[in-house]
Amino acid sequence: MKHHILTSLLIFIFTSAISQNDTKIKGIILDSKDNTPLELANIYIEKTNYGTVSNSKGQFNIIIKSIESKIGISFIGYETKIIELNNYNIHDEIVIMLNPIEEFLEEVIITNKPIYKILENAVNVSRKKMKETAILTSYNREILKTDNDYCYFADAVSKYHIKGKGKKIKSKLELISSRIKEGMCLDSNKFIEKSPFPYNLEEFIEVPFDKNRALNSVIKADTARYVFKIKSIRYDSIQVNKIEFKPKDTLNLKGLDVRGYAVYDDATSLILEIFIEKASNKKEDGTDINIFIAEWSNLDFKQNYRFRYVDNSYYISYIMEYQKIYINNLYATKYDKTYSFFTDLTTLNYEVKSEEYEFDRYKKDFIYLNGHNYKSEFWNNVSKTESEEEENFNLYLKTLKE
């Protein structure tokens, strides 16, 4: 009972704190030359750790405390822009044009050191930098669908209580508020409770480095399995390095064979972005897995991690993971379904703390399992932007009613 009273009090305090004098800014970020939307651009309130990212249409929502606030927008290959909100009509959607960097050329770097060793060093340095006791407030989202039907959409505002350093970094999760929209998968409850997806919401914040099997397999495989290339590029108005990796063409593309890249700051060796995807998403190249509850094949997966380094604080700003699996046996019953699972995290605020406080720890793997704990007055003050995945889910629900 004590924990529930404390949790309710924390929700009230957090809701009250963000609702006083708050203003929601809606905007869209476009390329200044061809007006194309820029997806996953970083939007942040200057001189703070508060921010969000744009969706596939370049749109974003962000809560500000004062009209005097300045907003920064950055995107790879573009000039970073700082805007003063009092120059805009904030009651309308503000349009922000980013200018491509004219001299944006990818220059291949020649190095005597093995590139996979450079990547390994960047991973180790980045892992060690995440060492503060901190609270990361985030917006989390999950979507599960089958071949033809959406199973559910779930999202939540969460607080990750981070403690430790290096490989000993750990996080505990506090779910502030959540909601669920149900689809038409009749067996989604049974499936999700014993899901073959290697996913744990509580450990989400630890995934990019320590629990990233795909990235670690690239580093350990060195040049025997992978081709590496390192380039110098512009990122967030600074010169950084980009390591690209892909399997050698002669390999049979199965298992954890992936392709992707990692962007890091050469001055600090801190990683700014990681993108990884399965090298082949053809069904014949799927990874067959057989355990006592299920037989399935991993057909596809993608990962995207982004980081910010502000005022000596280094933290995750965005996480996206996507998996697609084909299940042919579940609980000793013949099965014939393909499931797709999408999840992401957008950091809303990062606050360094010297102490921890008591709270109801969330221990389940999925937001979906937590149930519906939605407070509309709270969510009106959250910097969330509808994604393309959420929009497709809502269209699906609409077709069911027609």
Image: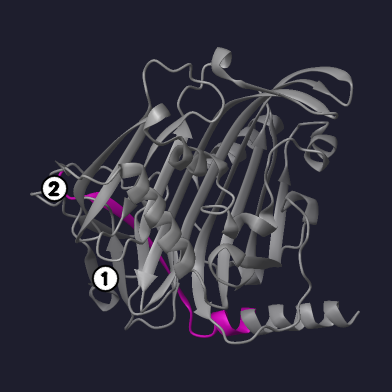
Q: Which residues are magenta?
A: 15-33
> Up-down: is 67 above or below 341?
below
Q: Is residue 18 magenta?
A: yes
Q: Earlier in the sequence, mark 2 or mark 1?
A: 1
| Mark 2 → mark 1, Cα distance in angstroms | 29 Å
In the image, is 228 to the left or to the right of 374? left
Give SS at disc 2. loop
Q: Nearer the viewer, mark 2 or mark 1?
A: 2
Query: Residue 88 shows which numbered tag?
Result: 1
Residue at (63% x, 64% y) in the render:
157
As helix, strand or loop, the secondary structure at mark 1 comes to: loop
| Coordinates of residue 13 in the picture (x, y in percent) | 66, 85
Quarter of the figure with the C terminus: top right
Q: Residue furthest top?
A: 284
Q: Amino acid at mark 1?
A: Tyr
Taking 150 as reference, is 40 above or below it? Answer: below
Is residue 371 at all visible to an observer of this figure? Answer: no
Q: Nearer the viewer, residue 271 or 399?
A: 271
User: Based on the displayed image, in which of its 4 quarters is residue 270 positioned?
Assistant: bottom left
Q: Quadrant of the N terminus?
A: bottom right
Q: Amino acid at mark 2?
A: Phe
**Mark 2 surroundings within 10 Å by alpha-carbon count, few (fewer than 14), some (14 through 19), many (20 or more):** some
Q: Residue at x 53, y 66 (%)?
A: 166
Q: Which residue is mark 2?
A: 104
Q: Looking at the image, which is closer to me, 306 or 251?
A: 251
